[in-house]
Every structure is written in C-alpha cells, then in structure tokens.
Image (tube, grey):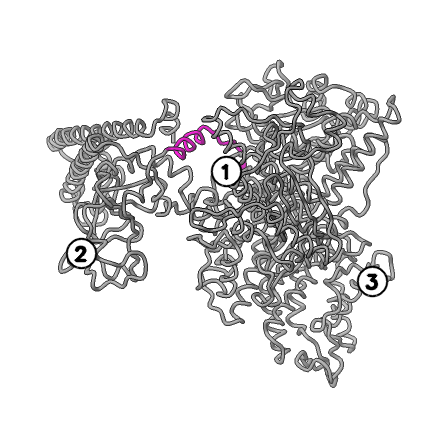
Amino acid sequence: MPLFQKSVLNKYLNNQNKKVVEDAYNTFTQYFHNPEIQQNIKDAKEEQFQEGFLRELFVNILGYTLNPNPNFNLTTEYTNETGAKKADGAILQNDKALAVIELKGTDTKDLDKINKQAFDYKNNHTDCTYVITSNFEKLRFFIHNAVEHIEFNLFILTKDEFEILWLCLQVDNLLGGIPQKVKKESILVEDNITKQLYKDYSTFKTELWQNIVKNSPDHDKLLLFKKTQKLLDRFLFIFFAEDSGLLPPNSISRMVKRFDLLQEEDAYKPLYEIFKQYFDYINIGRIGKTRQDDIFAYNGGLFLPDEVLDADFHNEGLNKGLKSLVRTGTLVVKTLVDDNVLKPHVLKMTSYDFQSEVDVNILGHIFENSLNEIENITARLEGQEIEKSKTKRKKDGIFYTPKYITKYIVDNTIGKLCDEKKTEFGIIDEEYTKGRKNRKKNTIKKLDTTLNEYRKWLLNITICDPACGSGAFLNQALEFLIKEHSYIDELHAQLLGISIVFQDVSNHILEQNIYGVDINEESVDIAKLSLWLRTAQRGRKLTSLSNNIKCGNSLIDDPEVAGEKAFNWKKEFPGIFLEKSKTAFHVTTATHDSRTSQRMVDYKVREKRDDGLRPDAEPIWLNAEDELLITKVISGIVKEDKLNVLAYNICGDHIHLLLVCEIDEVPKIMQKIKGKTSRAYHKIKDQDKEFSGDKGLKPLAQTPLIAEKDKNVHLWTQKFGCKEIGCEEQLRNAVGYIQTNRDKHKLPPVIDDKGVNSLVAEIDGMCCDYEYAFRSEYKGGFDVVIGNPPYLNMTKNNTNIIWLDFYINKYKSIKKAYSKNLYTLFNEKSCNLIKSDGIVSFIVPEGFLKTRSYSDCVDELLLHGKINKALYFEEWVFEDATTGSMIFEFIKNKCSSIQFEELYMNKNKVIREQLNNSNSITLKYETLDFPILTDLCNLFKGMVVKNRSNFIQKEKVYNPNIFLLGNCIDKYFIKDKYYCDYSELTIVGGTKKIEKHSIAPRILIRRTGDFLCCVMLPKPALTKSTLYSCSNKDDRVRLDYLLALLNSKFLTYIVRQKMITNEQAFPQILLTDIKQLKIPLVRKKVQSNIGLYSFNIALYIENYSKMVAQFSNLLQSKFDLEKLSKKLQNWHELEFGEFLKELGKARKIVAKTTTRDFSPLPLAEQSEWMQYFNAQKGKAQELKKQIDQTDKEIDKMVYDLYGLTDEEIRIVEQG
C-alpha cells in the first residue's frame, strides 16, 4: 500500500487550518519556487547548504527551533547512541531523536542509494520513528521502515502536495505523532476495506456462479466457474476504470439506471444484455454524445468475444443450455444472468471508491483469496477431497507475497543488474546535473549517448516469475522498471535542459520485459488483470499479455505427462530462448613445443629462450598414464557442460576432437579443456619433481585465452586448429580419421591392470551419436528469475503420481533426497532459465541452505554458479505457513570473487549483516578429520503410533512397556514416562521392531527444539518418533562420553548453524544431520574421565529435580493447591517474602473455589516455614551450582577436544 490510505489521509487533511497552511505555502513558494534560488541550490555543494536547508524549510516554514537556540527541537550533526557516526540532522523530542535526517546534494538523483545509510542512523536511536531523506530538491518521508515512503518534489510542489507535507512534517503534527496516527488508521482501514470488499466480492462470485449454473444446465460446471471468474474480471476492470477516468464516470450506475428506465417504458431488456453491449464497446470502442462519454477500444484480450459470456441469447436455436427465461407480459427474453442477482451486487461493488479506497495492492490480497476459492471449488468439482481447515493453495504451500518481500527481491536482482550496468557505462549522476552550460559539445554528446545506451539495455532486460500466481512480483518489477525509466528521463532533462519522456514505457515493459507462468488458468487471468489495472491509460489500448503471461506446468515439458499443462519454455518464449545454429568442427591441439609455427620462426622464439641456452625443440610427449589422465579430465568437462563430441582421440603429442556446437563456442570450450588438463597434468608432474628434482619447462609464450591463474602451467601450444565440417561425407571421414589416429601413429593401446583398454572405455563414455549431437539446443534465457515458488513436501498422497515420477527422474534435486519439496524443483529449473551472469532470487523455507535434506538442490545450483546472498527473518513472513522463510540469491557465474553474504531482517524490516565469525568455526569443524556419529553408533527413529493417546497411560497397571515422548526428557534427565502394551499398538511409521527398542543402555536424542537435548536410557523403553536412539556399534566409544559431547554447547552451536529445520515455526533436528556430527575418538582414559562428569551431572540433576518436586508436592498437599503458579513452581528462585506473597495468592484462589477458609499464616507458622524454606532453598541452590559448574567443565573439555581458540569459545558462548 502507499504510505497513507487515501480516505484516511483526506480526513486528516480536511481537519487542517486551511488559512494557516495557505500562508505557509505562500512563504514556501517564495523561496523554493524561486528560479534563482533553485539554481543556486543546484550549484551548491552538499555541505554548503545542509544547515541552510534545515533553516529554510524546517525552521522558517515548518516551525522548528534549531540548535543552539533555547528549547531547540532540531539539530545538525546528530551522533548515534552507539558509535561515532552522525546523521546530518535530527528532530528531537525529550532530548531523543524522533526523526533522523540524511541530506545529499541535488547531484544525487537516486535517493534509494541513501536509504541504508539513513536507516542505519535510525536503528542506532531506540525511540526514532521517522526517517527523512532529501537531495534539497526532493524530500522523502518514511515511518518505521523503508518499504513505503511519500516523496515531495520541493521545486514544483503544488498546494495540495504541500498540505500533505505540512501534515507530515509541521512541528506540532510531527511531535504530536499525527503521521504515525494516520499510518495506523490507514492500516486498519485498509484491512477493514479488504475484508469487507472480499466478503462482498466473494458473495457476488458465489451467487453469480450458482445463477449461471442454474441457467446453463447443459454446460460443464467447471467451465462455467472459470467463465464466472472471467466475468468478474471484466466487472473489476470497469469498477477501477470508471473511478480513475478510463471510462465515463458512474458507468455501472448509469447502465442500471438505463435498465430501470427501459422497464418503466415497457421496453424491457435484461441488465446482463446491457452490460454485454458495454463489454463490446470496451472491446471495439465507441464515440459518445460528449467527449467524456467516449469509450476507447481498450481490449487486451479480456473483452474479446467469448463463446459463453457473449453468446447471442436471442437466437432460439443457439446456446440451448445457456438460457434463462424472463417474462414481461408476452415477451420472452433469454439471458445468462438474472437481473435480481446482477443488479444488487454491481451496485454494492460500484459503491466502493476504487480510486481512493481500493488500490491494486488490496486487490492483490483479494485476488489471492479468490484463487484459494477457485482452486478449492475446482478440486471439489474434479472429485478431490478438501480439508475444511485449509484452503487448497495453503495446503499446496502457496502464499500471497507481501510488498516488502517483492520489493526487496526486485531491488536486489533487477536493481543489482541496473547498478552494475550503470557502473559499466560510467553513469554518474553528478555529471548530468551539471547541465550543458559551459561544457563541450562532445562531452554532452558522449553523456547523452551513454544514457541512450543504458536505456537500450534496460529496454531489453527480461524478468520472469515461473510461479507467478496473481502477479505480485511482476507488478513489483513493472513498478521498478517504470521508475528506472523516469530516472533516465530526469538525467536527460538535467543534461539537455529540456524534458524528454520515453513514450509508452509501461506498454513496452509489459510486452518486452516481464514474463510469467502459472499452472492455474485463473491465476494467469488475474495476473494479467492486475498488470492492466496498473498501466491502463485513457485513450490507450491495453497491452495483450498472451505472449508473456502464460498457463502451464513450469516443471514439465512432456505432453504425455502433463497433457495440455505441459510447458515447453523454448517454444513458448522463442524471443528469450534462441535455437543454436550448430555445426561440426574438427578441432586439434598439440603439446607444448611439439610444433613449429611461422611466428616462432619469424620471432626466433626458441633461439631467444633462456638467452639462447635452449635453442632446440623440447616437445612434451604424453605417456599412457598422461593420456588417460587428460582424457578423463576432458570427459569430465564433456559431461559437466553437456558437450556434443562425436569422436575423440589422443596421440602422444596431440588430441583430436569432433565437436558439434556454434562457432563462437569453440574458443571457450578449448580454453577450458586446455586450462583444466594443464593443471591436472602439472599437478602430477609437480608431485614427481619432489623425487626427480625436475624443474619443468617454461612456456614459450603466454596465451591470452588462458585465465590468469593458468599462466606458467602450459601443456599445449598457444593456438589450436579448427576446421568446419561441410557435409555428411566429410563428417563420416572425420569420424573415421579420428577413431583410427592412434593406429596411424602406431601407438599401443592403454591397458589397465585388469586387462581393460581404459582409454577406449573413457572415450566411449564421452562420445555421443549423430542424433544426440545435432538435437535442438537453445541459448539465451532470462536476465532475472524471481518469485515465491510453492512449498510442498511431495508424496504419493498429495501429488499426481505420474508427475511425481517425472520430477524424480528429471530433477537431481529430489532424485535421492529424503524430503522431496516442490520448491527445490523451481530452484533447479530456474538455474536453467537464466542466461550466463543472470540472477535467481526466491523466497523459500528457511532450512534451504541449512538442512541436509535440500543439499542435492544446493549442490546442483553450485555446479552452475554461486549462491551469494541469504536473508533470514526474525518474524514470520507468511502467517499461515508452517515454516519460516529465507530469501536466497543465485548468480550464474562461478567467479571466485563473488562473496557470500548472510543477512537478517528484524520485525521493523531493518536488515543487518550477520557477522562471519561463526563461519570460521564451522569451517574449522568441517575440516576436522574425526569419524562421524553414524560410523560409531547405530541410530534409529522412534515409532509413530495411530491414536496413541488411547493406548498409553500414566499408570503402569497391566501395561508392561515404558513409552517415552519427546517432552519426557530434559538434558541428562528422564522427567516423565508413560506405560503401554506393545502388542496393542498400531504402529504406522518409524521403527516398529521391539528388538531395537529393547536395546539398553542407549542415548535418547530429542528431535524437536533448536538445541541438542539428550539423556541416557538405562533400561529398555519404547520411544515416539520425536526421539532418536543411539547405541554402540562396537567398543570404540563410551556412551557416557558421547552423552557429554551431545549435550555440550559446542555441538548445539554446530547444529544451529546448519541443521535446524523449520526454525521459525516448529524447530527440528533431522536424524540425517545428527548422523553426520563429527565425534573426536580419543583414548579410553579421556573418554572415561569425561564420562564421569556426564554421570555426575545426571545425578545432580536427578537429586535437584526430586528436591524441587518434593517441596512442590508438600505445598499442594498442605494447602490443597490443585496447580502451582509458575513462580511457586520455581520457589527456590524466590525470597521468602515473595514466596509467602505468592502462596497467599494461591490460597485465596482455593478459598474462592472451595469451602476452605483463607486466613494468613500465624507468625509462629511463618517462622517455621521460613526456616524450612531457606534450608530447602539452600540445598536446591547448592545442587544447581554443582550442575552449572559441571556443565561448564564439560563444555571446557569439549572445546579442547575440538581445538577452539579463546575467541571462538567466546562466540560459541554468546550463541
């Protein structure tokens, strides 16, 4: 939403003193609208005008008092509460910053660039609410966060805009909290409007559909439901258009009025037929009686004739299932929708002000709710069961993305590419704000050309959301690109002194820049509608979005699997993915110094080498081991890059490759082959040098094709041969020639110790057939792929089984994964949808980078590029989700200079960088050469019991088996237990065999929670699936030693770095991750010593728990207390006076609910209680002290075992 909701804002504006505001505006314009002053401001440097700006605007107009005047509430250079950094200014209340002010000169055109700096200042002032940024010409006002703001152009500010500026920034208003009140009311009103509008919209949709179904008995209900949605989309467009000036005002009301008039004149016409006529006008256009009544031909597809909605109902012989008979006298009229359904609903909907009350963001929420209903009804009509407690979209992990998320992702992907491109072009705002006065024509021309080049690039950027839903990300991308074009327009105007606006920019963006796909047809229609509503202009045709926003399964391209939902990206977006023009090339390259080129002769390269000491050729000859090594490296490249190799051979001092690719791909392929094989070859030779003392050969020359890191490791000559194959006969000859080349050179086969020709086997593995080599391949892709893919842990119960099998066979992310989550397929697919250096950024479950379940997906991404950023959240992003969220950013570039950033967003939407100190600890841990837990122990998960509560009890009675749940244990202590009869249990998952549950002793590890909680189980017991069991494989490790390690701070720290899944909702540690914990295998004496600490702390905790429980039981028994308050449960932490007070409260409650009388304890009894209380408290505290001390000793020993430094220990202790 905008910063303020329009109707709320108008209410506050109407309450302002018009005369006072008008006088202030006159004073304002005398200064800020003065052309000479404006020019002087533009010419002034930032530091020169900072105080002047504050004085002229905030003091002289808005009424503040500037420091050092008495009782000042405005100051310059305001220092942060922590650190030495200073904001340019601050508005103070009670001597604390209420608002921080960050100023730049007019040469800073992009105010977004200073947001971070300004909000860093805000975050360093605990009571700061507002942020003000300005470049002296424009001023932005923020409340709490940077997601929304209101901007004022001071140089051209209208009176109406000044009224808003006054409301926000006038001294009494700001200090009185008026802007925050307006914001809070705006949120409340928008929420209420959203709820009420959706209620009315939903009722309209339901009754409309039911009526159409009644009137169309011969048509498929699902088809009619989809047509109902399309009809609603038409009405929504009209509601918006009539309130925003795109259509004649009050269009709906006027049509209803016309309907009423025709009825009164006995010329009845169904209301729907009148609307149908209006739909046709919007499609083809109409000249009205007055210019205001003109209807432009807006259609972009929404109002094209529809075989159901626009059927000709007056023809008795047509559309027999679509006819409702409405009788007026002797006249029989046929229509699709009855008047009594249509009339009240359109009047109710048109009563909303779609210009001031309902913005497109509100519609976004309504659209998403609508999609929930659409998918539920669709599923029901298709015979699927729907849980009442969940919408189908929420069950499928689909959630509407809030504005601050779409903005963050768009700013950090499209914005990132734009910033990089501006840097590449050398676009500096300051150079344009200087204008053309007193500057050379060539300079102006160069700056103008540069800006045009940047515009040209921007016009061709491509952005896609492969699961676009109702279009939240596409709308945000549209908003960003429009703004970026405005930025270019502004720089042009500054440079040339004239306003040049790029025409039809929004149409171009819709047609050329943004693309979306969704599996749901109605989602696609709604996404189109939301984009039209944002961009529609009076008198301009709506852009057809059919070529850009499409319906299909983004993940399946096979019609035999997905039918009409199958989506072939290459065919659907031919302008994005271009088919390669492939040719066969016979490529040869020879080893270093094995050939003599004319250049070497001309420049006497050998004669000059080492001052003439090595004038003879010194060719490298590859032995059989070298040939096999090089071939294996090349084979790896072929498989990794999916190269098409029809034939290959290696012959002592040269290789042959028959490549099928585009001509411009050959140099890159050969650069990689030569570089990687050189490094592999020299690595082996360097190892040999340690024994032979061979210094190796210096290269004859540095080749520009080899990367910097490959210098001085040349194996091959600088150049390679490349001959294009012109016809089929040449191709056959080339294959034969290459395959027999070793025979020609009389080279022996490369036979391994098993008698296998290893070289031939390796060659056969890398070469492909003709059909595969010349298959259709594509290049290109999107610059940016963004979105919020659905989160769904796919099983046979919730996913089409044919689709699931396809996913498992097609996508490496889930082929072997324990958790087969749908979003990982979108991650992997998107990597293939972007071009080189393109960016993917999705919001996904928080465990993506931290949980081993998704490691296959991460590994697949890392084959093609780098994950360079991860953003986590302090609070929930999606209220109805069952997992927390994170945003990752992937760049399709393996450049080693790309650094990984880990960030956190707090509840105020402020982003902070996570310190990387912890990374050094985890890196050290990863490099430790310790066995993992699963090498030392057998681990299994507890059982899942159907209707468990019916079969387990607190009393033993006749139940022979102990049953433990996750909440039955604490660290080192089993605090509770249940009983059951194993033979009566229905075990539906987990570990069923009682033999495993009979193993004792064993360690129990709790699955839930964000820390390791483990206890020794001395006797056999059944366990629920929320407990893992760990028992010895052999005698290499003592269980009591292992228990101490697992309960230590350090291993919990390691678990928290990467192993917690579902952290924000229901944190859990997966068994697969527990198994991978590294365990130091030390001498038995050391293990025994640490194990003794483990035994002692368990004993202390047991005694402590018993003592606390005994005292608590005494209180309950003595005073008939059914339940103790939290304070009484922790009686040992209270002073006696607090204890007595809390006990009195509890006794009063008992007195109110029973016949027991309440009277204060006599002094003598109080004295006895005090003596007893203090004695028991002392014992409890002594035990607690022993527990804490032992725990610290264990942690210290564990830190030593893992080799932590003092600084690393400090980081772990701080959590």
Nearer the camera: disc 3 or disc 2 = 2
Q: Residue furthest front?
A: 746
Label at residue 907: 1
Give the extent of the magenta segment: 904-928
Give percent across and percent down for residue 1182. 18, 28
Please name the residue that numbered disc 2 is placed on: 961
Q: Quadrant of the rendered structure where residue 149 is?
A: top right
Secondary element type, mark 2: strand
Real-space Cα separation, disc 3 to disc 1, in angstroms: 49 Å
Q: Quadrant of the rendered structure where residue 896 is?
A: top right
Secondary element type, mark 1: loop
Question: Mark 3: which amino acid?
Answer: Gly
Question: Which quarter of the rendered picture does the C terminus lie within?
Answer: top left
Real-space Cα separation, disc 3 to disc 2, in angstroms: 81 Å
Please name the residue that numbered disc 3 is placed on: 285
Q: Is residue 858 left or right of residue 60?
A: left
Q: Earlier in the sequence, mark 2 or mark 1?
A: 1
Q: Is residue 926 magenta?
A: yes
